[in-house]
Amino acid sequence: MAGNSFGRLFCVTTWGESHGPALGVIIDGCPPRIPLEPEDIQRDLERRRPGKHLTSPRREPDRVEILSGVFGGVTTGTPISLIIFNQDVRSRDYDELAQLYRPGHADRTYEQKYGVRDWRGGGRSSGRETVGRVAAAAVARKFLGQQGVQVQAYTVALGGVVSQSFDLEEIDGNPLFCPDAQAAVAMGERLEQVRRDGDSVGGVVEIRAQGCPAGLGEPVFDKLDARLAGALMSIGAVKGVEIGAGFAAADMLGSNHNDPVTPDGYAGNNAGGILGGISTGMDIVVRVAVKPIPSIEKVQQTVTRQGVPTTLQIRGRHDVSAIPRIVPVCEAMVLLVLADFMRHPRDFGN
């Protein structure tokens, strides 16, 4: 099936299903001599792992194994293959769904396209596919770190609760990756309320990249912001992307939106670090709108595979919100885009 690979010079291909024996990723184009140990990858996988507070009760250790591309603790420049075995699979929870389409999921469109689907948790269309992306991005993070580039994602809104302050140290200090401690508490309470109601909520994740050199991106069809938007929209729960001021720019005057140019750079960053599709050297700031999880306990209208109208009440182990587990996934896609552009031999000679 096409569409499982991402990137051109730093290229990743994910594989595996939610209820298959394992998932994994192959990374082609990682430079040699980059120090890399399993724990470098494990740290990022731990952040998106299920079975923690406010997430799905599915208990997956998500332990990564490096099968190739690393020798003596450093990358060799050859393809890196990573594997994560599924441990806590309960396919029987999904038996009812073999003959039904879940509202808000890709069940029907997938079957319409391919004539077959893996109904056990969604197969390739499951959010569990993203474990390979996060693993690959941990490798990209090591490469970008050598170039002085850092990427951080965090929750700025969840279920109608909006972060009002920004404390960098607070992001990893709460389970929702929120930079506002008080908002994090309110978000947690909101999730618990929605869980009791058998429903779900969405939110907004912001991703900030610091240390990016000016000059990343190409004019017209290969703009940096276009690639970032496409990468983030490839995440199943993401329904919108904005750069810098984003949609707020529609209500601004040009005199307010334009970032003044100074001898030292720019005196503002409404552009979000990108002008004309090319990085300016300022922080790259991207936000994504995350839809509510479609698997809810409330009764919903649907049809069988034969087109017979019926109702469905989804059981099993599900998140109330894609946040917080989607936060490291959003971070991962930005890391992969930047690593791909930083591998461009014409501009950076790597």
Image (cartoon, rainbow, N blue to C red):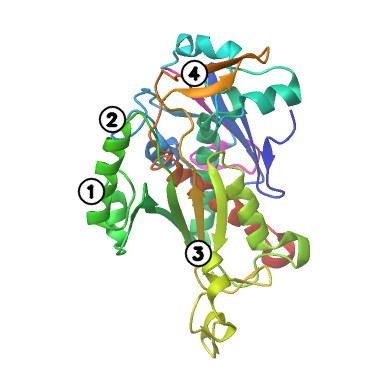
Reading the chain from its start, which is encountered first: label 2 or label 1? Answer: 1
- Residue type at mark 1: give it: Val
- On the image, which quarter does residue 302 sit in? top right
C-alpha distance separating marks 4 and 1: 33 Å
Where in the figure is residue 65, as x and y percent of width and height?
49, 28
Residue 272 relative to residue 41: left or right: right
What residue is at 75 percent from the left and 68 percent from the top? 219
Circle 2 Cα neighbour tier, 10 Å, few/some/many (<14 / 14–19 / ≥20)? few
Reading the chain from its start, which is encountered first: label 1 or label 3? Answer: 1
Circle 1 Cα neighbour tier, 10 Å, few/some/many (<14 / 14–19 / ≥20)? some
Q: Which residue is label 2 attached to?
A: 196
- In the image, 163 versus 86, the foreground residue is 163
Element carrying mark 3? strand
- In the image, 340 versus 197, the foreground residue is 197
Circle 3 Cα neighbour tier, 10 Å, few/some/many (<14 / 14–19 / ≥20)? many
- Which region of the structure is painted magenta? 70-87
Reading the chain from its start, which is encountered first: label 4 or label 2? Answer: 2
Q: So how many labels did they put on this image? A: 4
Q: Which residue is label 3 attached to?
A: 285
C-alpha distance separating marks 2 and 3: 35 Å
From this viewpoint, is residue 16 visible? no
- Residue type at mark 3: give it: Val
Q: Which residue is label 1 attached to?
A: 185
C-alpha distance separating marks 1 and 3: 25 Å
Residue 110 relative to residue 36: left or right: right
Report if the CB atoms under discs 2 and 3 are less than 8 Å apart. no
- On the image, which quarter does residue 39 sit in? top left
Q: Which residue is label 4 attached to?
A: 312
Position of the C terminus, as image quadrant, is bottom right
C-alpha distance separating marks 2 and 1: 17 Å
